[in-house]
Amino acid sequence: MRKLFDFESSAQRYTADAVAVCCFDARIRPVTSEFLRRNALVHPDMVIVAGGGLALSSPRTEFDRAFVMEQVRLAIQLHRAGRVILMSHADCGTYGGLAAFDGDRAREAAHHGSELCRASAIVRTACPGAAVERVFLTFDSVLSVDDQECAGH
Ligand SMILES: [Zn+2]
């Protein structure tokens, strides 16, 4: 190996404040960081996959759901993550973006809310001890999908 540069990182073991499943879309990286900061999630285990939490509810391939679930399980097992935060975002290209909703942001948000509810039900079944939260990111706000919103799904 050839050294590229020196950099000091903490080698301390940690307990993950949460495991967050979010999309790889670079546009949402700043708001994702802000969400983590505001929630004091200093050591989040990040599962970054196309579609984020929707990879569980509407996997694009037969492997996606099992892959993402295994990552969540590993964060719980290795770093004792007690919270699972499922995230998705507006205009997610993985699912056709805003265009798939004919530009209707309210319809897009409702769809994501429903998908995140289905995703959280899958996680709760697989990891009964985990506290599961759902977050929808837009380009001007961060929205929570609360349990009562999922009651009808
Ligand atoms: Zn996306």
Image (spheres, rainbow, N blue to C red):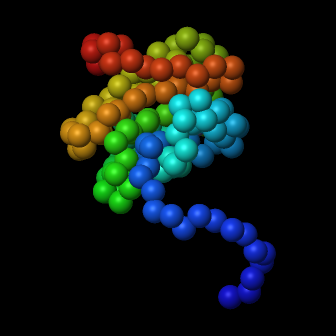
Q: Residue at x 35, y 33 (%)?
A: 132
Q: Residue at x 46, y 62 (%)?
A: 13
- The percent position of residue 119, horizontal first and vertical second, equals 35, 34
Q: Residue at x 51, y 64 (%)?
A: 12
- The percent position of residue 6, horizontal first and vertical second, equals 76, 74
Extreme-bottom residue of the structure: 1
Extreme-right residue of the structure: 5
Q: Does residue 34 sit above or below 16 in this rendering?
A: above
Residue toward you, 35 or 52? 35
One can see residue 110 in this view: yes
Q: Is 130 on the left-hand or right-hand side of 16? A: left
- Indicate the quadrant where residue 151 lies: top left
Q: Residue at x 34, y 51 (%)?
A: 80
- Indicate the quadrant where residue 133 lies: top left
- The percent position of residue 46, horizontal first and vertical second, equals 51, 49
- The percent position of residue 31, horizontal first and vertical second, equals 66, 32
One can see residue 60 in this view: no
- Indicate the quadrant where residue 150 lies: top left
Q: Quarter holding the N terminus?
A: bottom right
Q: Is 40 on the left-hand or right-hand side of 7? A: left
Q: Does residue 52 sit above or below 2 in this rendering?
A: above
Residue toward you, 100 or 109? 109
